[in-house]
C-alpha cells in the first residue's frame, strides 16, 4: 500500500471514527469474498452485473469492476464489502444508505443526490459514479448475487457471515470450572497438581526452585516438562482457558471499559515479562526462596479462598493492582509482565498449533473482528487492510480462539504446523487511488 493511500485511510479514520451503536446492532456480515488466486480476469462478473444482475430486467452500470495488473498478470474485483461499520453510511448527508438485518448495505435512490461523499468515505472505493453521473453500488442482488453464480472459476464466494457461537460459551465454562477447581476445591494447589500418577508443576515455579535451592530435583523437572509439553501441543491454552487470574481479568474486561488510561511506552513492551522473569530468578537465587510466588497474582487468586485469604495479607494486594492494568488495555498483565506466560510462550512458539488468518477469505477493513476481539492485541490491523495474512506470534497468543469464533467468513482458523497454509503474504492492490482518479475525472 502506497504512502498516499495510507495517509488517506488515516484521514478517513479521523473523519469517520468507529461507531459504537447502543442496543441491538446488526451482527451478520453478509458479503462476497474474492480470491484473486482463482481470478483469470475474464470479466463475466462485471458483464452479468451490467446485464441487470439476478433480476436481469435491463442493462445498467455494473456494480462490480475488474482491475488488471498487466505487469503481475493478476486481476482484482472491486465491489461493496457491506462493512460491519459502513463509513459510506455515516458520510451520506441524506441517509440514503442503510444496513439491513441481513447485513446488506442498500442505497435508497429516492434520497441519493449523487454527491459522491460515499465514494470518498469508502476505503475500498466500492461505490462508483456511472457515466451519466449516477452513484451506484452493489446490493448483493438481495442475497442472490449473479456474479457469484457466473464466475466459472469460483473466485467469488457469497457468505452470510455466520460465526462460531459455541466457542465463547465453552471457553467461559472451562474457565469457570477451572476457577472452582483450583481456587475452591484444590485450595492453593495451582503451582503443583497430582493427576493420577503424574505430578504437573508450574514451569516458572520449578525454575525458581532450581535457582533458590541451587540444585536440580528430577521429579520437579519432570513435572514442569509435562506442563511445557502441554503448551507444545495446545499452545498457551492454560492462559486462555484455565488460568484463574485470566478468568478474573476477563470478568473485569466485561464490566469495566478499556482505555481509561495509557501506560508509558516503556511499560508497553512485550519483552518486559522476560525481564520480570529474569529478575525473579535472580531474586530467588539471592533470597533462597521462590521470590515471585509471593506476589504472583495467579497463586494469589488460588490462595484467596477460605482461611488462606486471611493468612495471605499483603500478598492478595497484587490481585487488584494487576487487574487494574486492564483499565488501560485488555490482559495488560499477560501482555507485558507475566513471567509464567512468558515461560509457556517459549514452548508454544515452537509448538504444534498456530492461529491462521487466511487473507483469501478475509474481508479486510470491512470486518476487523479478529483484531477487535483479540485480548492480546497481536493481530495487526494494518496488514489486514492490505489483504496480507498476518503472522501470529504463538508465543504471545493465548489460544483463546476469540478470533476464530468471531470471524464470520472462516478466515480465522486453528491449524497444525504441517498443514498447508491458506495465506497470502503479498499485499492486494489498493484501488482507492484509482477510484479517486476516476471521480476527479
Image (tube, rainbow, N blue to C red):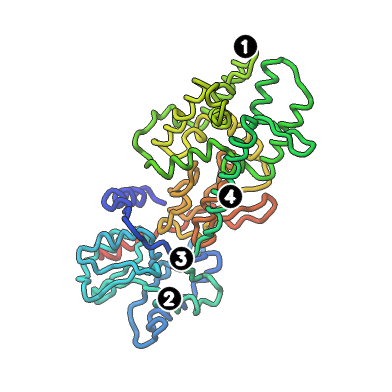
Tag shown at residue 355: 4
Mark with earlier residue (1, 2): 2
Q: Residue at x 46, y 65 (%)?
A: 76
Residue in front for this viewpoint, 379 or 224: 224
Q: Mark 1 or 4, which is nearer the eye? A: 1
Q: Badge 1, how many Cα within 10 Å: few under 14, some, many 20+?
A: few
- Please tell me whether mark 3 or mark 1 is closer to you in this view: 1
Mark 3 vs 1, N-terminal side: 3
Q: Is there CB contact under 8 Å for labels 1 and 4?
A: no
Foreground mark, 2 or 3, reads 2
Q: Secondary structure at mark 2?
A: helix
Callout 2: few (<14), some (14-19), or many (20+) C-alpha neighbours within 10 Å?
some
Mark 3 residue crowding within 10 angstroms, few (<14) / some (14–19) / many (20+): many
Q: CA distance from mark 1 to mark 2?
A: 68 Å
Q: Secondary structure at mark 3?
A: strand
Residue 355 percent across, percent down from the top left? 58, 50
Residue tagged 1: 286
Q: On the image, numbered disc 3 is attached to which residue?
A: 76
Residue indicated by mark 2: 143
Mark 1–mark 4 Cα distance, whole angstroms, equals 40 Å
Amino acid at each position: 500500500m502506497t504512502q498516499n493511500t495510507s495517509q488517506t485511510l488515516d484521514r478517513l479514520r479521523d473523519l469517520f471514527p468507529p461507531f459504537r451503536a447502543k442496543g441491538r446492532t446488526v451482527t451478520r456480515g453478509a458479503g462476497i469474498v474474492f480470491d484473486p488466486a482463482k481470478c483469470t480476469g475474464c470479466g463475466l462478473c462485471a458483464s452479468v452485473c451490467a446485464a441487470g444482475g439476478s433480476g436481469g430486467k435491463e442493462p445498467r452500470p455494473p456494480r462490480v469492476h475488474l482491475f488488471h495488473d498487466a505487469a503481475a498478470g493478476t486481476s482484482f474485483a472491486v465491489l461493496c464489502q457491506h462493512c460491519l461499520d459502513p463509513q459510506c453510511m455515516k458520510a451520506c448527508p441524506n441517509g440514503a444508505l442503510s444496513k439491513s438485518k441481513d447485513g446488506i448495505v442498500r442505497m435508497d435512490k429516492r434520497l441519493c443526490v449523487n454527491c459522491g461523499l460515499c465514494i470518498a468515505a469508502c476505503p475500498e472505493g466500492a461505490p462508483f459514479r456511472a457515466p451519466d453521473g449516477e452513484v451506484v453500488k452493489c446490493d448483493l442482488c438481495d442475497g442472490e448475487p449473479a456474479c457469484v453464480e457466473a464466475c466459472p472459476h469460483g473466485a467469488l464466494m457469497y457468505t452470510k457471515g455466520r460465526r462460531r457461537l459455541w466457542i465463547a460459551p465453552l471457553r467461559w465454562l472451562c474457565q469457570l470450572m477451572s476457577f472452582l477447581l483450583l481456587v475452591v476445591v484444590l485450595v492453593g494447589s495451582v503451582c503443583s497438581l497430582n493427576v493420577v500418577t503424574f505430578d504437573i508443576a508450574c514451569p516458572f515455579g520449578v525454575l525458581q526452585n532450581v535457582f533458590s535451592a541451587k540444585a536440580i530435583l528430577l521429579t520437579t523437572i519432570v513435572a514442569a516438562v509435562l506442563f511445557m509439553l502441554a503448551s507444545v501441543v495446545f499452545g498457551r491454552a492454560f492462559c486462555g482457558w484455565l488460568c484463574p487470574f485470566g478468568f478474573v481479568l476477563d470478568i473485569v474486561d466485561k464490566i469495566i471499559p478499556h482505555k481509561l488510561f495509557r501506560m508509558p511506552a516503556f511499560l508497553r513492551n512485550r519483552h518486559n515479562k522476560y525481564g520480570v522473569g529474569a529478575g525473579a530468578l535472580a531474586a530467588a537465587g539471592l533470597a533462597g526462596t521462590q521470590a515471585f510466588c509471593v506476589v504472583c497474582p495467579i497463586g494469589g487468586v488460588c490462595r484467596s479462598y477460605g482461611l488462606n485469604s486471611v493468612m495471605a495479607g499483603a500478598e492478595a494486594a497484587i490481585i487488584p493492582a494487576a487487574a487494574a492494568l486492564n483499565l488501560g488495555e485488555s490482559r495488560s498483565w499477560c501482555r507485558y509482565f507475566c513471567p509464567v506466560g512468558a515461560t509457556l510462550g517459549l514452548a508454544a512458539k515452537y509448538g504444534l498449533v498456530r492461529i491462521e488468518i487466511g487473507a483469501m477469505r478475509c474481508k479486510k477493513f470491512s470486518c476487523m473482528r479478529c483484531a477487535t476481539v483479540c485480548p492480546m492485541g497481536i493481530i495487526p490491523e494494518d496488514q489486514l487492510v492490505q489483504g496480507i495474512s498476518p503472522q501470529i506470534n504463538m508465543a504471545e497468543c493465548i489460544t483463546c480462539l476469540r478470533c476464530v469464533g468471531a470471524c464470520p467468513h472462516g478466515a480465522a482458523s486453528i491449524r497444525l504446523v504441517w498443514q498447508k497454509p491458506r495465506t497470502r503474504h503479498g499485499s492486494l492492490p489498493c484501488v482507492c487511488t484509482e477510484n479517486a482518479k476516476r471521480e476527479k475525472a
